[in-house]
Amino acid sequence: MSVARNRIAVYPGTFDPITSGHVDLVDRAAPLFERLIVGVAESAGKGPALSLSLRVDLAREALARHDNVEVRGFDSLLAHFVKEVGGGVLLRGLRAVSDFEYEFQLASMNRHLIPEVETLFLTPAEQYGFISSSLVREISRLGGDVSDFVPPAVARALQAEWKRARE
């Protein structure tokens, strides 16, 4: 694997929505790489609450302070996306031990599909370890305040989405 390729990391996910935990991970990973590409997956099979274009826009706003971070939507196999952008490292977050088995399976499959790419796991800061996008969506959908868990624009977008869905 070339040194230059290692300097481009890809952080994939559905980011439905992007949370403070995701932002924390990017804040800590961005200085480690020449470029960090946040790949927002379409993931139609998961039935995201927010559209791909809105998730991309919210991630761009949340991560705008990083000059070397680019946010891109994709609807292909992750291995193809990583090759397309020239990534050498796949960045994944581990919140808890329970995440490890699934992430280990993904890393092993990706090693088979894109052997030139390494997977790097980072853990969130302790105050974000319990936050998940699915919990944030559910709390927000039921009218709870999620402002401690997501950037302000995300909280507003979720409120607007649930209001629109009720009308």
Image: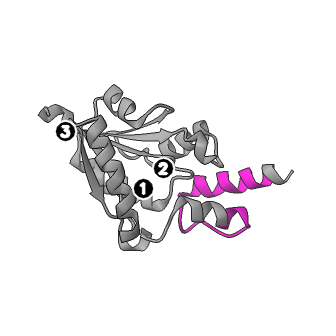
Give the spatial CA distance, label 3 vs label 1: 21 Å
Q: Position of residue 165 (x, y in %)?
A: 79, 50
Give the left or right position of residue 31, taking residue 26 as reference. left
The mark closer to the camera, 3 or 1, is 3
Of 98 and 65, the residue lying toward us: 98
> Which residue position holds label 1?
23
Of the residues under marks 1 and 2, which one precedes in the sequence? 1
Which span is picked out in magenta?
A: 139-163
| Residue at horizontal 79 percent and vertical 49 percent from the top | 164
Give the class, few, some or many, for how many residues have Cα within 10 Å of label 2's Cα (few <14, many ≥20): many
Amino acid type of the residue tagged 2 in the rendering: Ala
Give the spatial CA distance, label 2 vs label 3: 25 Å
The mark closer to the camera, 1 or 2, is 1
Q: Quadrant of residue 95?
A: bottom left
> Which residue position holds label 3?
6
Give the left or right position of residue 122, taking residue 19 as reference. left
Of 82 and 155, the residue lying toward us: 82
Residues under numbered marks 1 and 2 in contact, where contact means CB atoms less than 8 Å apart:
yes
Say whether residue 68 is magenta. no
Amino acid type of the residue tagged 3 in the rendering: Asn
Give the spatial CA distance, label 1 vs label 2: 7 Å
Q: Please tell me whether the stretch drawn in magenta is mainly helix, strand or loop.
A: helix
> Which residue position holds label 2?
62
Of the residues under marks 3 and 1, which one precedes in the sequence? 3
Q: Quadrant of residue 54?
A: top right
Say what secondary structure mark 2 lies in: helix
| Residue at horizontal 47 percent and vertical 61 percent from the top | 20
Q: Position of residue 81 (x, y in %)?
A: 39, 31
